[in-house]
Amino acid sequence: MAEQPDAPALPPEASPAEQDGKKKKKPKGKEKVRSVWISFTGRIFAQILGAAATIILGLLIARQYQVNARKDSATPTADAQRISRASRPRRPGETALVVLPLENLSGDPQQEYFADGMSDALITDLSRIDGLRVISKTSSMYYKGQRKPLPEIAQELGVDLVVEGSVMKSGERVRITVQLIDAKTDEHLWANKYDRSLRDVLSIQAEVATAIAQEVKVVVTPKEARRRTESRAVDPAVYDLYLLGRHSWSLRTVDGFQDAIRLFKEALAKDPDFALAHAGLADTYSFLGTAGYSTPAVPGGMLQAKAAAKRALALDDSLAEGHTSLGRVLYYYDWDWPGAESSYRRALALNPGYATAHQWYATLLSEQRRDQEATVKAQRAVALDPLSPTMHMTLASVHYNGRRFDLAVASGRRALELDPNVLAPRLILAGCFMAQGNDRAAIEVCQKAPSPPHPLILATLSAAYHRAGEKERAGALRRQLLSRPGVSTAALVRLHAGWAEPDLLFTALGRAVAERSEIIPRLGVSPLFDAVRSDSRFPALLKRLQLHN
């Protein structure tokens, strides 16, 4: 508390010497009052300055404390909030929008998947409209069940508009209520209610997306408008199975993928021409066909993904998901670099807001040594899905391939803060630390991986210990890895590259080529192989694969 001002100062008394001698002249009335007032105001002014300085210093200390507290926060929720408040890059004239998870009003918790599926479908429909930046489902679902003020959500995601509403499914009827809100002012701009048969669910989504686009003055092309009016009716049971399959697929686990395959196949048994279910199968088989998701990769997974993607596109060539899935197969399995790029570009022409297409295209561009283009695409993927660990992981990978290790570490840490269980960011962080000569940091980040450790983590940890001079620990981890049945070729490549064993490495790379391993496309750019780039066998291999060294 500030001190109270002193009483006005009294006129000074004469000194004893002055009292003995000549008396000092006393001030007259007005001069006396002026003297007292000047003394009083001077004291007050000094105290005000002191109080202001104290307040400013206190605010600075409090601000620094808050900054340090945020830095020290280790919880995913706190970090997700901090990360999401970063500014989101947007194109000139672009309107940013988020669809919050639609509320399930059926009273049946088992129907949550349906409400989530409708939210996802609406996001997909809106993201196809050029001129809108629509936040992807991963980031949107972060707010499910939360009661945050809309202006706060808008600030965290960097959006202008919020779509919210509810879904109530009863038998073969569905009621959807949707409203559009100005996120900054909390003003309701538009609202509507749809009460239809479940068979019309796809046309409802198209209607809502078109109405929102018109409300925010975004131009819908004639081709896009025609596509929206041509939505086919769908059997409610088939659509139900499809939504359940997408829910299982979104779990990104082997069990979830297997469940998704079963549900998509059940949907196709009822309606063989339902393109969305074929696209769902393509996405699922594509993930099972790579060692990062399935250990070992499912034999024939990529071929099944290719067949499903082609069938989906034969039924509906306007599905961005189908083109994206086909691009992934062409890239990782067929090694058809131009064909894969063409598929990704086609997907983005159909759906400019499809974050996954931006993400996978960024990977292709990075591994084809088109670093600047790759960075733009990876940043776009993060802007569309700012709370997705996989989008931050892809940006980390692009920086890693570009030898911007500090930036790669920052993006990799963000990904792990959002989800500590994701594999790839941990591998990228370890790779960055090893490239910088900090093997201890690589060991630490691998040791924090979930148990039991993935083969790729075991290979990296063994290599880090070996480089750090701890041969006994490195050897024990190596034996543990090699004793596992069906160890992936990708893990062997990582092990032998880290141990600097060129002969064993080239043997493993030969096996990777024969198996068409997903590690092949990154050979030309990954720092993992920098130590063998001068080996004559390496440029010869890249030339055969039409990759740049």
Image (spheres, helix red, strand yellow):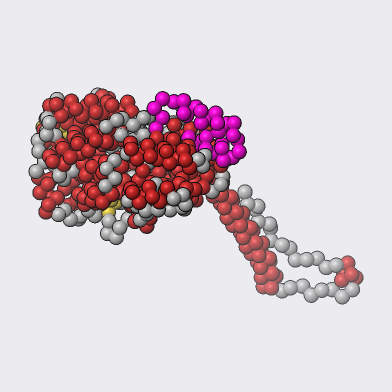
In the depicted structure, whether residue 460 falls above or below residue 110: below
Residue 458: say if magenta. no
Q: Give the extent of the magenta segment.
A: 459-488
Query: Looking at the image, how many numbered discs can be counted on the residues?
Result: 0
Instruction: Point out residue 238 in the picture as x, y percentages from the top left corner.
Output: 15, 29
> Where 196 sits versus 337, above or below?
above
Q: Is residue 486 magenta?
A: yes
Query: Is 288 on the left or on the right of 174, as rendered?
Result: right
Q: Is residue 408 visible?
A: no
**Residue drawn at 9 percent across, 43 percent down:** 230
Please report the residue visible at 24 percent of the width from the left and 35 percent of the height from the top.
303
- Side of 79 where 466 appears, left or right: right
Which residue occupies 50% across, 27% down? 480
Nearest to the observer: residue 74 or residue 152: 74
- Residue 168 image point, x, y percent: 20, 30
**Residue appearing at x 56%, y 49% in the figure:** 64
Q: Is residue 403 left or right of residue 118?
A: right
- In this orientation, which residue lies closer to the viewer: 233 or 277? 277
Q: In this view of the protein, which residue sits in the foreground, 28 or 408?
A: 408
Quadrant location of residue 206?
Answer: top left
Task: Write down the quadrant of residue 508 in the picture.
Answer: top left
Q: Would you say the magenta stretch is mainly helix, strand or loop?
A: helix
Q: Is residue 256 something that shows in the picture?
A: yes
Residue 333 occupies quadrant: top left
Q: Could you tell me residue 89's position as x and y percent?
A: 35, 55
Q: Position of residue 276 (x, y in %)?
A: 18, 36
